[in-house]
């Protein structure tokens, strides 16, 4: 019986391993990528205001981007594996995952709430200040790209330069709830943000020429997904993919090829959940929850009282319950109660609450799972066989558009309201800023 655990190797980039050689390897990976998923950890998000208009929301995140910092950049590069494609019912990707610790040289605010959240998830601020890759807002005007690898100078080896290489290569970008991430990326690695949201819209549309996809927006489209927070979507999609795999249906296959000069420093296992795994093995097991699930957590992915709340904050429990109530409850004759009395909670289970087990590499890990969700979305939106060329060694840049029907979700970012995405598209009424036009001419 196959093991359905995905062990995700992550390369941490810091001052000890980020040099000309590893930079060169990264650039090579960028150029062959089918898409790249990005996730940031931030030193804070500013005050969450109840903004009514897009412009107000933009201004509030812009203010945060100007005063807070990016403390880690997660990058997952998905490269469609043409050779594996020929061998059966797979959608195979080679995946390279990075977690770059980054340190802004200018003063910035660290919000206590954001810091304690990060520390709770294993983020080490000592490590960040000792080994983080420095970047400065003053460097944003230095845009130069050597023609040949031999011309790389140590000054080119910067995390900002990696981000610009991604933009230059026009590889499609995948984010989860990426509105904030895009503003932070723009301000910290590219240029000052324009005053108006609609001008930002035009600039970004021109900057990310391979398109931007937001898995949160995509999840609104799927009837199968009742919530839209990342850990829920990923675990649900991982289970769906495993069901396909177990029944020999076409599924996403993830491969982690070896690096040339880099070494992954951490391996994060993604398991499908113990009871669900038993079910897959053919064992007749009930997924009825034996713990009461925290409703708030189940809905949104967080509980305000995480330290005192004794209810389950484990996404696997949420999914088990969902499975039980849709597939098993009616046939379970031994059923007595839908919810067990919280008094009977096993105290051991309280410590098992899911912390995403990413040990301080959340940005890298989250970029991987964002990319995985997108890959599964591709699988379910493939063009008919005769019109796609999955098996051919096509150009990496048009891999998405020539093989999948995904135009309806392209360049749409989730905002607060489900029905109103932030759309990146050319307008006849709003122009790009002159600052952007000047700068992008150096990029492309
Ligand atoms: Zn709770």
Image (spheres, rainbow, N blue to C red):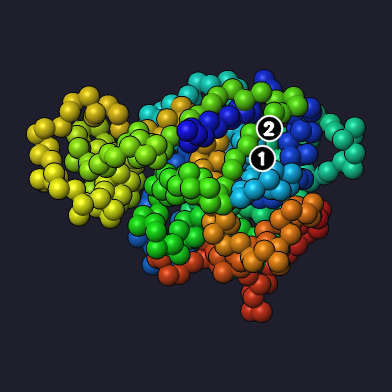
Q: Which sits in the foreground, 125 or 381?
A: 381
Q: Does the numbered disc 1 mark a residue whose Cβ is under 8 Å from ligand 1?
A: no
Q: Does the numbered disc 2 mark a residue whose Cβ is under 8 Å from ligand 1?
A: no
Where does the image place residue 429, in percent across and percent down from the top left? 64, 79
- Judge the density around disc 1: few (<14), some (14-19), many (≥20) Cα neighbours within 10 Å: some
Q: Residue at x 25, y 41 (%)?
A: 286
Q: Which sits in the foreground, 150 or 94?
A: 94
Where does the image place residue 219, in percent across and percent down from the top left? 45, 58
Looking at the rendered structure, the number of numbered marks drawn on it comes to 2
Q: Secondary structure at mark 2?
A: loop
| Quarter of image, res 344 | top left
The answer to whether any part of residue 199 appears in the image is no
Residues under numbered marks 1 and 2 in contact, where contact means CB atoms less than 8 Å apart? yes
Q: Secondary structure at mark 1?
A: strand
Q: Residue at x 74, y 59 (%)?
A: 389
| Quarter of image, res 155 | top right
Q: Quadrant of the C terminus?
A: bottom right
Q: Residue at x 73, y 36 (%)?
A: 26
Q: Which mark is residue 94?
A: 1
Where does the image place residue 21, in percent across and percent down from the top left? 79, 27
Task: Locate residue 170 relative to residue 347 in the image: left or right.
Answer: right
Cα–Cα gap, marks 1 and 2: 6 Å
In the rendered image, the vertical position of residue 330 relative to residue 68, given as above or below: below
Task: Locate residue 393 relative to residue 111 in the image: left or right.
Answer: right
Task: Locate residue 125 relative to residue 324 in the image: left or right.
Answer: right
Q: Which mark is residue 257?
A: 2
Q: Residue at x 75, y 62 (%)?
A: 437
Where does the image place residue 188, in percent across and percent down from the top left? 62, 45
In the rendered image, the vertical position of residue 360 relative to residue 138, given as above or below: above
Return the disc, 1 or 2, that comes first in the chain's sequence: 1
In the rendered image, the vertical position of residue 377 relative to residue 23, given as above or below: below
- Judge the density around disc 2: few (<14), some (14-19), many (≥20) Cα neighbours within 10 Å: few
């Amino acid at each position: 019986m196959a093991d359905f655990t995905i062990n995700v190797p992550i390369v941490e980039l810091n001052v000890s391993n980020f040099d000309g050689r590893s930079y060169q390897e990264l650039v090579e990976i960028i150029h062959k990528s089918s898409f790249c998923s990005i996730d940031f950890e931030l030193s804070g998000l500013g005050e969450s205001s109840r903004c009514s208009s897009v412009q107000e929301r933009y201004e509030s995140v812009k203010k945060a981007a100007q005063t807070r910092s990016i403390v880690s950049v997660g990058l997952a590069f998905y490269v469609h594996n043409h050779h594996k494609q020929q061998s059966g019912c797979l959608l195979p990707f080679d995946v390279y995952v990075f977690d770059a610790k980054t340190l802004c040289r200018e003063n910035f605010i660290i919000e206590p709430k954001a810091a304690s959240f990060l520390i709770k998830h294993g983020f080490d601020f000592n490590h960040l200040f000792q080994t983080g890759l420095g970047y400065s807002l003053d460097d944003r005007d230095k845009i130069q790209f050597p023609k040949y690898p031999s011309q790389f100078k140590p000054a080119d080896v910067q995390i900002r330069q990696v981000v610009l290489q991604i933009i230059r290569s026009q590889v499609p970008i995948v984010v989860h709830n990426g509105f904030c991430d895009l503003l932070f990326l723009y301000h910290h690695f590219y240029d000052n943000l324009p005053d108006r949201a609609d001008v930002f819209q035009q600039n970004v549309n021109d900057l990310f020429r391979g398109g931007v996809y937001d898995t949160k927006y995509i999840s609104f489209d799927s009837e199968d997904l009742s919530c839209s927070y990342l850990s829920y979507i990923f675990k649900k999609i991982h289970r769906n993919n495993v069901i396909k795999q177990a029944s020999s249906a076409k599924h996403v296959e993830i491969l982690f090829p070896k690096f040339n000069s880099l070494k992954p420093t951490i391996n994060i296992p993604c398991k499908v959940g113990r009871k669900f795994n038993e079910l897959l093995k053919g064992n007749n097991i009930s997924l009825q929850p034996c713990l009461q699930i925290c409703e708030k957590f189940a809905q949104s992915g967080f509980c305000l009282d995480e330290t005192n709340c004794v209810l389950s904050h484990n996404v696997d429990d949420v999914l088990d319950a969902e499975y039980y109530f849709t597939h098993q409850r009616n046939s379970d004759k031994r059923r007595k109660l839908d919810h067990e009395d919280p008094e009977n909670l096993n105290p051991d289970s309280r410590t098992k609450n899911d912390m995403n087990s990413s040990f301080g590499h959340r940005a890298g890990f989250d970029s991987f799972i964002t990319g995985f969700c997108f890959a599964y979305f591709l699988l379910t939106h493939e063009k008919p066989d005769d019109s796609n060329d999955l098996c051919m060694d096509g150009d990496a840049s048009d891999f998405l558009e020539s093989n999948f029907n995904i135009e309806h979700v392209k360049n749409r970012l989730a905002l607060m309201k489900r029905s109103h995405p932030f759309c990146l598209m050319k307008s006849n009424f709003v122009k790009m800023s002159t600052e952007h036009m000047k700068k992008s001419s150096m990029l492309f």
